[in-house]
Image (cartoon, rainbow, N blue to C red):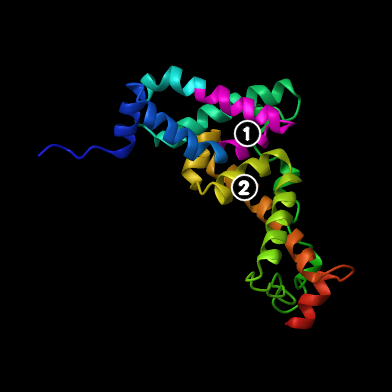
Amino acid sequence: MGEPVHPDAEMAARLQDRHEATFTEVVHTWSPGMLRLARSFVSTDESAREVVQDAWVAVVAHIGSFQGRSALKTWVYRILVNTAKRRGERESHVVPWSSWAPDEAERQAPTVDPTRFFSRDEAYAGHWQAFPAPWPALEDQVLAGEVRRTIGAAVADLPTRQRIVITLRDLEGYTTEEVCDILEITPANQRVLLHRARAAVRGTLEVYFAGPGEDPTKRSQEVA
């Protein structure tokens, strides 16, 4: 028996043969995620839609060069990122891609308020003084919708590099290796950017769940 056909190889072959139903399927399935990522690079929703359209044109034009070294979706997303980079740079919306690596200040700055941890001269130095309060279960649909909007706003407010990495990892579900492949960054840089992005979003949610005018730090101490 021959080797089983990998789904990516079969799909790529169909796209190379201009199989209309396959192309329609991948465009319908992947475009929403591509649009979310493209929006992280450019200044308007319309620009993001144009980026996705241009990326699909490039996919059709270059599908014959796909060799299966990475997953087909990863290959498509790399084309999307390169297209979005060029558009974003024209709009002066993104940092120069030569400076993708976090700078020293970004690496060294604390991601959580240091006063929430025991100081060096105290017992349990570096540990939480009080664990953050648990968040309520999101069984209520209205509350769940509000939380999703809060998370979306928090992600939108992140610095560009952090926003792109957290979008790929936590919204699109890519692995560290895949994100590094798509963005052509090192695992260490991806780790720093993701850690800072997640910390910022957690901080926003902590304030949201604490309620108006309430200090989330004090709330966590009272609950502990």
Residue 157 percent across, percent down from the top left: 76, 46
Q: Is residue 12 left or right of residue 39?
A: left
On screen, 5 above or below 86?
below
Q: Is residue 202 visible?
A: no
**Quick one: label 2, few (<14), some, or many (20+) residues within 10 Å?**
many
Residue name at image x 70 percent, y 23 percent: 89
**Tag 2: amino acid:** Ile
Q: Is residue 191 left or right of residue 91?
A: left
Residue 160 percent across, percent down from the top left: 71, 38
Please tell me whether mark 2 sits on a helix, a strand or a loop.
Answer: helix
Residue furthest to the front in view is 21
Residue name at image x 20 percent, y 40 percent: 4
Q: Quadrant location of residue 96? A: top right
In the image, 207 versus 39, the foreground residue is 39
In the image, 84 versus 122, the foreground residue is 84
Which label's residue is closer to the chain start, 1 or 2? 1
Residue stretch in magenta: 34-56
Q: Does residue 54 belong to the magenta stretch? A: yes
Give the number of marks.
2
The quadrant in which the C terminus is found is bottom right
**Tag 1: amino acid:** Ala
Q: Is the magenta region chiefly helix, strand or loop? A: helix
Q: Does residue 64 belong to the magenta stretch? A: no
Please tell me whether mark 1 sits on a helix, a strand or a loop.
Answer: helix
Q: Is residue 167 left or right of residue 149?
A: left
Write down the residue under mark 1: 38
Write down the residue under mark 2: 166
Residue 217 percent across, percent down from the top left: 81, 71
